[in-house]
Amino acid sequence: GVECVVVQSVNRASRISSKGKVSAVDYRLHFRLLSDLLRDLAPRMDEKSEVGLNTNNIQVLGLFANVLYFLQPKQVPGFAFAWVELLAHRHFLPRILTTRHEHGWSVFHKLLISLLSFLAPHLRASTLPDSVRTLYKGALRVLLVLLHDFPEFLCDFHFSLCDEIPTNCIQLRNLVLSAFPRSMRLPDPFLPDLKVDTLPEMSTTPRVLSKYTGSLTFNNIKGVVDSYLKSRTPASISAELIPRLMFTETGTSASSNGGRYNIPAMNALVFYVGQLAISQTQNGSGSPITLTSHMELFRNLASDLDPEGRYYFVNAVANQLRFPNNHTHYFSVLLLYLFADAKKEIVQEQIIRVLMERLIANRPHPWGLLITFIELIKNPRYNFWSHGFVRCVPEIQRLFETVARSCKMDSI
């Protein structure tokens, strides 16, 4: 109808201007047109059809979402600020995330991924221009709205969102990982007598809507992993697997990803193996969790990866420390086991580094992150306060003690 023609014309004008064919474009006009259009269509989206389904809602939101996707910041950088405003518009975001059977979730996920993907290379830089800093704050506000009003969306898509968030953006990642279902009441992680293993929520499997297995096709990682988990061959799994997690040549792929390693592939590997281990445990495997081929693979990677690769590996594990569920339970046990079993102190130091980076960031902090760190500093088995890296310099020791006090723990 008329609305479609208006939207398509704005889309065309914006795309032409982005290619330099128009000398000056006032994007405020485009924003006003789209914003007014969305407001005028709002009553229509709330109408019910004869069968009780809000088909207008789905159709109009789908049209508007397609336009936003074509106008995403990568395509029209000059429209980026207005684009974020439209993404979080009160007539768009709440409606698309409350569509029947969650039909709008995948659409909104695609838009949010496009925003994070645009920001990622800029956020990896050591200094941010004011424009990027402002756009980052806009993305932060969108995630805060989702965390407060639609936490289940962040819970279900946490994996793909973390894939797009650069490793140095701790607060952004914490926001995503701190989400928990509104129907759940989180146990207080600071209770001195909290028995995490006995919580009934720790046996439930969370829903994950992110498609992550595609990353495992990189250098046939999945084939190597499946072979090892089935027969523990090749015996030198690290020598076979680690080169496959790296880019074969320096260039666009490596630099755009921030390093020599394929981080999405590392994240997918850790999650894939962890899920298989959890399934095996649920099916009643007789092997203790620390003696399985899955744990052996993780132990070899933690020991044999270089510092850069190990940092990404530990971050991939920490990304699964969320609200109470069997993923959080398994990966918390994994991290504690790797710390206790480490033959090299650098492994323990990097585990603590990843946890501390996330804890010293502004709140909120993921529940699973808190219970893992508290167990690490409280349980004498881990002998936390005796490690050299804790007391190497007074400033570092004071930092650890401050974090310990904030976790209501007393240092030794």
Image (tube, grey):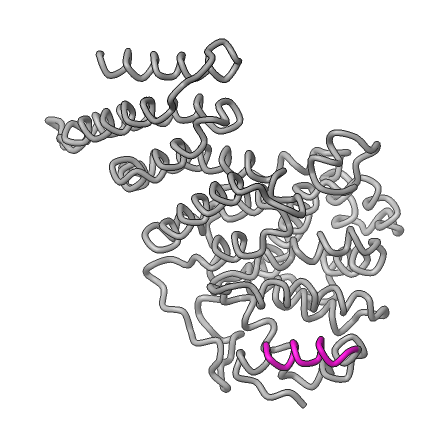
Q: Residue at x 80, y 69 (%)?
A: 342
Q: Residue furthest front?
A: 23
Q: Residue at x 40, y 46 (%)?
A: 142
Q: Residue at x 81, y 51 (%)?
A: 232
Q: Nearer the viewer, residue 333 or 137?
A: 137
- Residue 317 against residue 369 in the figure, above or below: above
- Residue 4 against residue 290 in the figure, above or below: above
Q: Nearer the viewer, residue 300 or 259?
A: 259
**x, y percentage for residue 17?**
46, 15
**x, y percentage for residue 187?**
42, 74
Quarter containing the N terminus: top left
**x, y percentage for residue 276?**
63, 51
Indicate yes or no whether the magenta region holds residue 399: yes
Does the image show residue 135? yes
Left or right, 54 with reference to 128: left
Q: Residue furthest bottom?
A: 412
Q: Nearer the viewer, residue 168 or 298?
A: 168
- Residue 100 against residue 156 in the figure, above or below: above
Q: Which segment is the magenta one?
A: 393-403
Quarter containing the C terminus: bottom right
Does the image show residue 382? no
